[in-house]
Image (cartoon, rainbow, N blue to C red):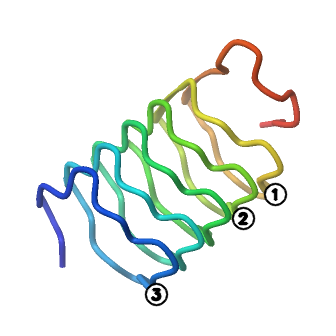
Amino acid sequence: SAKNCIATGLLFHDTQLQGANFEGADLRGASFANADLRGANFKGARLVKCDFTAANLGPLPVSPASPKYADFSNSDLRYAKFDDANLLNALFHGADTSETSFKNASIMAPKNAPTAFVA
């Protein structure tokens, strides 16, 4: 378990982290590119500028979390829960968001971002 840990800037590329517990963790700037995060817990985690490019994240309880400036491009987000999350400048280009929940989430796309995100 990495609950409440500080892991800023760490690289978790291509890792198998199914069911990992990152609840309350400070993961600012961490990279989870191509990681398998199915069932991982990011509730209350600080996810500022995290890279989730092409990661498998669904089903994933994120809320309430702060994935500001996070990149979820080309990720599998099916059944992920971003309820009450702050998604300021988060990228979702090419992500599979079928059955993803964004209830009460704050969503603001970055300027000049691709418009392929539909919540």
Name the residue carrying label 2. 78
Q: Amino acid at mark 2?
A: Arg
Query: What element does badge 3 sit on?
Result: loop
Question: Relative to residue 81, is residue 28 depicted above or below?
Answer: above
Report the disc number at residue 41. none
Mark toward the start of the polypeptide (2 vs 1): 2
Q: Amino acid at mark 1?
A: Ser
The image position of residue 86, as x and y in percent, is 46, 29
Could you classify mark 1 by the number of other residues whose Cα lies within 10 Å: few (under 14), some (14-19), or many (20 or more)? Answer: some
Query: Which residue appears at 81% of the width and 57% of the height?
Result: 98
Question: Relative to residue 111, is residue 92 depicted above or below?
Answer: below
Query: Which residue appears at 70% of the width and 49% of the height?
Result: 73
Residue lying farthest to the left in this orientation? 5
Query: What element does badge 1 sit on?
Result: loop
Q: Which of labels 3 and 1 is toward the front?
A: 3
- Label 2 close to label 1 by CB (< 8 Å): yes
The CA span between labels 2 and 1 is 5 Å
The image position of residue 40, as x and y in percent, is 41, 73
Question: Relative to residue 19, is residue 96 depicted above or below?
Answer: above
Query: Which residue appears at 88% of the width and 36% of the height?
Result: 116
Q: Quadrant of residue 74?
A: bottom right
Name the residue carrying label 3. 16
Q: Amino acid at mark 3?
A: Gln
Report the disc number at residue 98. 1
